[in-house]
Image: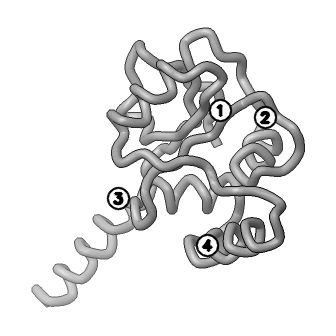
Amino acid sequence: MKKLFSIAILSLSSIVSAQAAVVIIGAPSAADISASDAKKIFLGKGSSALVPFELDENNPVRTEFHSKVTNKSDAQLKAYWSKQVFTGKGNPPAKVSSAAAMKSTVASTPNAIGYIDEADVDSTVKVILKP
């Protein structure tokens, strides 16, 4: 019985931790964007004046973001960008190492956008989309 209870608790805790609210952020003066625009921007499609920044690979917030916005897993995203680079169609967004680095970069770079966990949002950035 104790084993079953432990398994149930562990299952619930993993579900809760996977439900982090990811938000796309911009400088405090940034305008809101649509989910389809965000997908295009983060996949390097179309011509956008916005400059996307990514969190490092294997970051759970990055995984959650791409699952919700681009509908791509980490492996699919890696394959996508490998093909884009190989064919000369584009390069992946620049990477930052943490939520603090993302906020600093987005706040100080003109037309920059990125994503972080909603809990990390402060007055230095503006939430422009909640996917």
Q: Earlier in the sequence, mark 2 or mark 4?
A: 2
Q: Quadrant of residue 29?
A: top right
Q: Which residue is mark 2?
A: 34
Provide the secondary structure element on which disc 1 rests.
strand
**Quadrant where the image shows the C terminus:** top right
Give the number of the mark in front: 4 or 3: 4
Q: Which residue is mark 4?
A: 78
20 lies above or below 48: below
Q: Is residue 77 left or right of residue 54?
A: right
Q: Which residue is mark 1?
A: 129
72 lies above or below 100: below
Going by the numbered disc 3, the residue's amino acid type is Ser
Alpha carbon separation for disc pair 1 and 2: 7 Å
Alpha carbon separation for disc pair 1 and 4: 24 Å
Q: Classify mark 1: residues with Cα within 10 Å, few (<14), some (14-19) or many (20+).
A: some
Q: Where residue 52 sits in the image (x, y, percent)?
A: 63, 40
Alpha carbon separation for disc pair 4 and 3: 24 Å
Give the number of the mark in front: 3 or 2: 2
Q: Earlier in the sequence, mark 4 or mark 3?
A: 3
Q: Quadrant of residue 119?
A: top left
